[in-house]
Amino acid sequence: MSENSKVALVTGGNRGVGFEMVKQLALSGYKVILTSRDPEKGHQAAQKLKELALDVSFVQMAVDQQDSVRQAAIEVNERYGRVDVLINNAGVYLDFSKELYDIR
């Protein structure tokens, strides 16, 4: 990897706003790591962008599972050595004692 290449990681990058962020960062010249908790959907999304000649790779990560985050961090460090831009797009709902519509 070139020292001049900037590395971006986008959580929840397999669809919606996350997918578009991955695409736009890659179009801007970033090497982008797309993460998704679902490996099949993540690989499919990364492949779709690779077919557009964009520099996108996939790493599985479920942001609500500490072991998954830890493993993804190890993998990213081994493969890229750094992350210059982090987009925390994936969301989780952890307050199971309240209904989502009751949170204010």
Image (spheres, grey):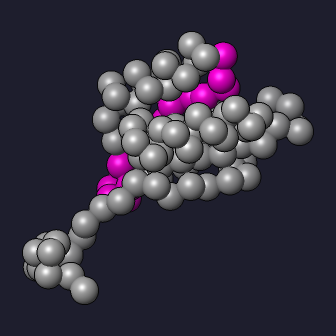
Residue 16 location, x and y as percent? Answer: 40, 42
Q: Residue at x 86, y 31 (%)?
A: 2
Residue 76, placed above or below residue 84: above
As rendered, which of 103 and 75 lies closer to the eye? 103
Quadrant of res 53: top right
Tell me the quadrant of the picture where the C terminus can be found: bottom left
Left or right: where does residue 41 sit relative to residue 43? left
Left or right: where does residue 97 sit relative to residue 68? left
User: Does the segment drawn in magenta span residue 56?
Assistant: yes
Residue 101, placed above or below residue 89: below
Tell me the quadrant of the picture where the N terminus can be found: top right
As rendered, which of 81 and 99 lies closer to the eye? 99
Does residue 80 appear in the picture of this structure? no
As rendered, which of 101 and 56 lies closer to the eye? 101
Q: Which residues are magenta?
A: 53-67
Residue 42 location, x and y as percent? Answer: 40, 30
Q: Residue at x 39, y 38 (%)?
A: 15
As rendered, which of 66 and 37 lies closer to the eye? 37
Does residue 38 appear in the picture of this structure? yes
Residue 64 location, x and y as percent? Answer: 32, 58
Residue 84, placed above or below residue 36: below
Q: Residue furthest top?
A: 51
Count of picture labels: 0
Quadrant of res 21: top right
Left or right: where does residue 24 sit relative to residue 94? right
Q: Residue at x 52, y 39 (%)?
A: 20
Q: Residue furthest bottom?
A: 104
User: Does the segment drawn in magenta span residue 58?
Assistant: yes
